Amino acid sequence: MAELQSVEAALAALLRDVATTPPEPLPCDEAAGRVLAEAIEARLDVPAFDNSAMDGYALHHRDAGKRLAVSQRIAAGSPATPLAPGTCARIFTGGEIPPGADCVVMQERVEVEADLAAIPPDIPAGDNVRRRGRDVASGDLLLPAGERLEAAALGHLAGQGITEVVVRRRPRVALLSTGDEIVDPGQPLAAGQIYNSNRAMLRRLLERFGAELTRVASIPDDPVGTGETLRAAALEADLVISTGGVSVGEEDHVKAALASLGQLDLWRLAIRPGKPLALGRLPGREGREVRFVGLPGNPVSCFVGAWLFLRPLLGALQGCPALAHLPCLPARAEFSTRTGPRRHYMRVGLEFGRDGIVARAFRDQNSGVLSSCISADALAVIPAESRVEPGDPVDCLWLRVD
Ligand SMILES: Nc1nc2c(c(=O)[nH]1)N[C@H]1C(S)=C(S)[C@@H](COP(=O)(O)OP(=O)(O)OC[C@H]3O[C@@H](n4cnc5c(N)ncnc54)[C@H](O)[C@@H]3O)O[C@H]1N2
Ligand code: MOO
């Protein structure tokens, strides 16, 4: 039997020449989770002016240790006037530092008697002053292209007064299921049939990875219908995904249809779960090439395949480097296991303790046992032909990310 291939080789083949989706303008209010198509330069200084970090008194530091008349009151949002020499200004958090002042003393340290503020000694220049442009200076790179717009980035855009951004169109994905035995939830189950659990699981994962599902369908069990379904799916999608039917079964219309419509490579990977994987290309609209990924039908193989292959692919389609790799955490195994010729991606829960991270494996790691994925914080990567004992180090790919 041909030698098993590596995940890295399959991933490189999958990601070769992936074109990003086209850019589209979008109001910032609708842009959460979307990926910037172009870098954004800051057009304002933030803060826009030197301002106070405290409620207190603004003064020149040479006047520290004196009793000073309070010559003005500066609330946040009202302009300051130059500070009369030898006086201080009552100031509030966010209030503009008046010209002539260079520090702020918080009010808890100041005694006010008969309109005079007793300032403690030795206040350094700059104390409690938030300098203009400290966060962002006009002309700086505010956000790079490829940034996924999450909370702080959206706040940063708003801080610049920006209302619209140019983002990558969501990758359009067709999600197809194979298998005569697979039935949609809501329908009655006949003997030997099972409900389609991969579809609901992948739909959620794909949406988390930034996709828009354009078609969710089952592939009919005949060659003509299969070809038509694949062709129609490719015309409206950037990516066509199928589940099931990638191992060595006899009747497989998907493989035949793909091979005749476009191109198909069948991979047998040295991993568990997820050994069989189909990668191909289909003709799309206007001569574009649409990627095809055929994941194995076993639900855990599907789940693991989605994290290992679909997430980086959706990252490449969106031009988003953050989706290329899962964060890898060093943990200590709380279990023992041994592997054969395939690298094992074990579903583990992680416990973060003072002495580091402990990885606990789900009791049943069979590729049909979807319960192993429910509380999986990570995939522990156990190299091929190795042995792990409790306390041994294991690399864990963190799954609590988008
Ligand atoms: N003789 C061999 N048999 C198998 C091999 C092999 O190398 N030689 N590989 C095994 C491995 S590993 C995997 S993984 C599976 C992959 O099989 P397929 O991708 O061809 O998938 P199916 O046979 O269609 O289904 C496998 C399993 O998953 C269930 N399934 C399928 N789709 C769904 C769905 N949408 N929701 C829930 N469950 C689904 C299906 O009923 C089967 O039980 O092949 C092994 N066999
Ligand atoms: O590799 Mo299969 O994906 O073990 O069940």
Image (cartoon, rainbow, N blue to C red):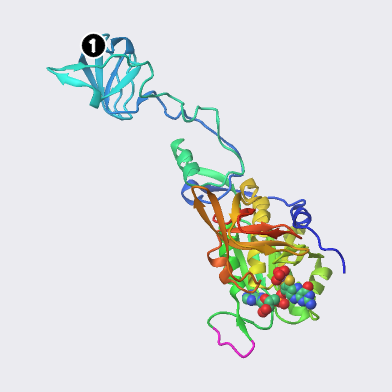
Q: Mark 1 points at which residue?
A: 66
State left or right for residue 95 relative to residue 8.
left
Circle 1: residue type? Lys
Nearest the viewer among 257 and 325 is: 325
Q: Position of residue 271 (x, y in %)?
A: 73, 63
* Numbered range of the magenta stretch: 187-192
From what the image shows, is residue 39 above or below residue 222? above
Q: Where is residue 240 in the image (x, y as percent from the top left)?
A: 69, 65
Q: How crowded is mark 1: few (under 14 residues within 10 Å), some or many (20 or more)?
A: some
Regarding mark 1 in the picture, which secondary structure is present there?
Answer: loop
> The N terminus lies in which quarter of the figure?
bottom right
Residue at the extreme right of the image, as rendered: 1
Query: Main SS of the magenta segment?
Result: loop
Q: Can residue 312 be seen in this view?
A: yes
Residue at the extreme left of the image, as rendered: 114
Residue at the extreme bottom of the image, as rendered: 191
Q: Where is residue 160 in the image (x, y as percent from the top left)?
A: 46, 35
- Which residue occupies 12% across, 17% down? 114
From what the image shows, is residue 327 above or below residue 93? below
Q: Can residue 296 be seen in this view?
A: no
Q: Position of residue 383 (x, y in %)?
A: 72, 57
**In magenta segment, residue 353:** no
